[in-house]
Every structure is written in structure tokens, then in C-alpha cells.
Amino acid sequence: MAERRLSALHVGETQEEGGALLTRVDAIINWARKNSIWPLPLGLSCCGIEFMATAASRFDMARFGAEVARFSPKQADLMLVAGTLTYKMGEACRRLYDQMAEPKWVISMGACASSGGMFRSYPVMQGIDHLIPVDYYIPGCPPRPEMVLNALIHLQQNICAERAHRGLEITKMLTAGKTE
Amino acid sequence: MTDLTDKATAEERPSVAVSAAMKVLRERWGDVIELAEENRGQWRVELSSRDPLVDIVRHLKETADLQFDFLVDVTALDHYGEEPRFRAVYVLRSMKLSEDLVLKVKVPEQAESGGTWAPSLTPLFRSANWLEREVYDMFGIEFRGHPDLRRIMMPEIFEGHPLRKDFPMEGTMTDHEWAEWIIARAQRVEESEAAGGTD
Ligand code: SF4
């Protein structure tokens, strides 16, 4: 039984011309990753509403493989900070980021998340990049859904150019081995 | 059951019981009551001293034909540049009479007038607990007798009281300082949770 299952998985046998698919590990892994970016929406204020519009049927983030909003950081790849980050919320934001598994990316959506926006006031952090690294900033108050999709497409292109083992344990092991 | 709409006209209904009560207040606490009147359907009482506050509120709450037994809100005003500087403001509602009453108490700032404090209403209303914490957080009025007077909105290391008129709009700490504190704290919480504790 176990033998049969193994042979069925063998690509060469199932294709008529006995061909095999050749690619680089980076290319195939990044291709899979970029088409299934699961976002963790951190909807903190009005931009969160605009994110909902982006995810809903009219703009349809599903077209880019990012429709599965995960509300557990452990299942998400992309933290989408949409809204005004107060100092008091900062801890939650940072902890959620820390709990996400590598590889992970961050999009800062809107003026508030990127720079504090119009709120130069005592409870508001002037940009989430004081707390977590950001891959893409989206300007606007709020940004239109098209801009969110645009950032997502840019992020996909960016992922294609990455080394697939970025940030993983194995990278650390490999680089540690090199230096010794 | 009393039907408030049918029983009396809009003018009669508020006035009778509450204006009688205002008279009682003036008689019993005449020296501290600066104002006790109706203004466009709402009752206002202003006190020059905070000392009899709890007694007055208890009277309003426990007198059978008043029953101001719902503390809707506690807030404050900052008359910056005056002394006494603050007013603690209490909004009470009587479900029985369908009436609102706003009670203002002068709270001085200077230490020689006793300092910035007001008596806590927590013995009378459990809802005063968080409301007074909010006023403490925003205005720095200390509520004496409160069981747990901590900040409720701002993080605990926050300096100053943001709704005071002399508070700088952008706060007193830099984002860098905040970030350092937040990251250290997040790490501490994660570690204690990983160790099975609660923070
Ligand atoms: S950027 Fe504008 S729309 Fe977005 S959270 Fe800030 S204020 Fe709201």
C-alpha cells in the first residue's frame, strides 16, 4: 500500500511523455507563497472599514490569493495594520507581530499607520514603524481599495525576488555554519 | 405602574418633587449650595465645597420620592487660571421621576486649599469606580476613598493628565521612549505566558 502511494506521487509516471518539472526551490516556494498571502487585519479605526471593502466582492482580494483573513497571528503571513495605532494598542500590535511565523510581511495602510496621520496628539504613535518593520506604506486617508490591491501586487513581486528561506531557522543554521 | 406621560403634564411632573427637594437641600446645606435651579428642563446644583458631597448625593439617592439612583456620568471641567481650578461634575438620573440632575463641585488645585481631590462616590454607586478612574486619568483629580484609583485609558507610565488645559497636545514622551517601553513589555508578557503564568 505504502509503495503504491509513493509511486503515484512520482511525476514522471503520470505524464505521458514521462516529463519532469524542473525549477529552482526559491521559484516554486515563492510562487506558492505569493499567491496565498493570508492577511492578519489589524483594523484599528476607519481604514479597517476600507480594508473590509477591499476584501469584499466588489474589489475582491481573492483575485490575488489574499482573501483568507486570519485572526490568529499563527496562521497569517501578512500583517495589515489599518488605522490609528495608540500607545496602548502598541503592545497588542507588537505581540501579534512577534507571534506570526516566518516568513511574514507588514503593510502599513493609511496615513495614520504610516505616520500618525492627522493625530499629532498624546496617545497616538507616529507611525507603526517605531514598533515593527514595514514592507509597504500606503498613503491616503483612507487609501482606496485599489491602492491596497496595488500594495499587495507590489508585495507579491517583492516576494518573488526573495530567498525562500528568509528569516527561517535554517538560514540561521546555514549562515552560522559558514562563519565557523 | 405609573404612566408618566398621562399622569402629569411636562411642567408639573419634573417640578413638584424635585423643586421640593431643592428647597430641602438649601435648608440643610445652605452654606455650600451656590445654585440649585432648573434650567430648560434640567436640574443644576453647584456646591462651593466638596465636603458634604457624599451626604448630598446620598440624600438625593435615598429619599423615597426622589431616587436619583443612577449615576450616568462623572466628568470634570478645567477653569485654567482660576482657583478653585476644577469642577467635578456628576450627572444623576432618577428613574422614578424621569429626571436628570447635574451636580458640580468646586475642586481647588493648590495645596493650601487642601489639594486636588474629591470624595469618591464608590460607596454609593458601583458605576463610579471606572468613571472616577477616567476623571483621575484625564484631569488628575484624586478621588479619596476609591478602592482602586489607577489610570484607565492612558498606559500606566504616562505622565500628566491630558485633558488639563496646560497639558502639551503632543504629550511628554517621545515615540522612541514609548517604543522601547512597549517592546520590552510585550516581550515580558510573551515570556511569562510561555512560562505558564498570567500577566
Ligand atoms: S488614515 Fe484616515 S481613514 Fe485611515 S485610520 Fe487614519 S484617519 Fe482613519
Image (cartoon, helix red, strand yellow):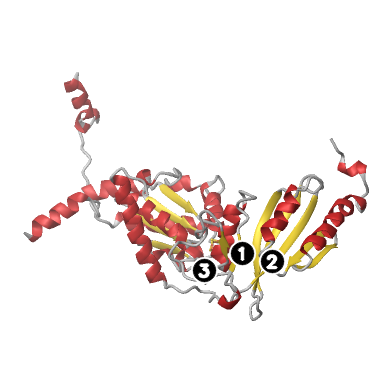
Residue plotted at (26% across, 50% down): A27
Q: Chain of mark 2?
A: B
In the rendered image, which quarter is residue B73 located in?
bottom right
Tell me if residue B139 can be seen.
yes
Residue beneath label 3, please? A117
Where, by quadrant of the figure, is residue B108 drawn? bottom right
**How far, Cα to Cα, is label 3 from label 2?**
38 Å
Residue B103 rendering spot, x and y as whole percentages: 73, 61
In the image, farthest residue toward the front: B28
Q: CA distance from mark 2 to mark 1?
A: 8 Å
Residue hosting label 1: B118
Which amino acid type is marked by label 1? Ala
Q: With respect to residue A7, does A52 lie above or below?
A: below
Q: Which mark is residue B105?
A: 2
Locate the N terminus of chain B and report the quarter of the image it occupies. Answer: top right
Label 2 neighbour load within 10 Å: few <14, some 14-19, many 20+: many
The picture quadrant for ligand 1 comes to bottom right
- Marks 2 and 1 close (CB-CB < 8 Å): yes
Q: In terms of sequence position, does the residue under pointer 2 or pointer 1 come before the other?
A: 2
Q: Nearer the viewer, residue B186 or B97?
A: B97
Q: Secondary structure at mark 1?
A: strand
Q: CA distance from mark 1 to mark 3?
A: 37 Å
**Helix, strand or loop at mark 3:** loop
Q: Is mark 3 within 8 Å of ligand 1?
A: yes
Q: Amino acid at mark 3?
A: Gly
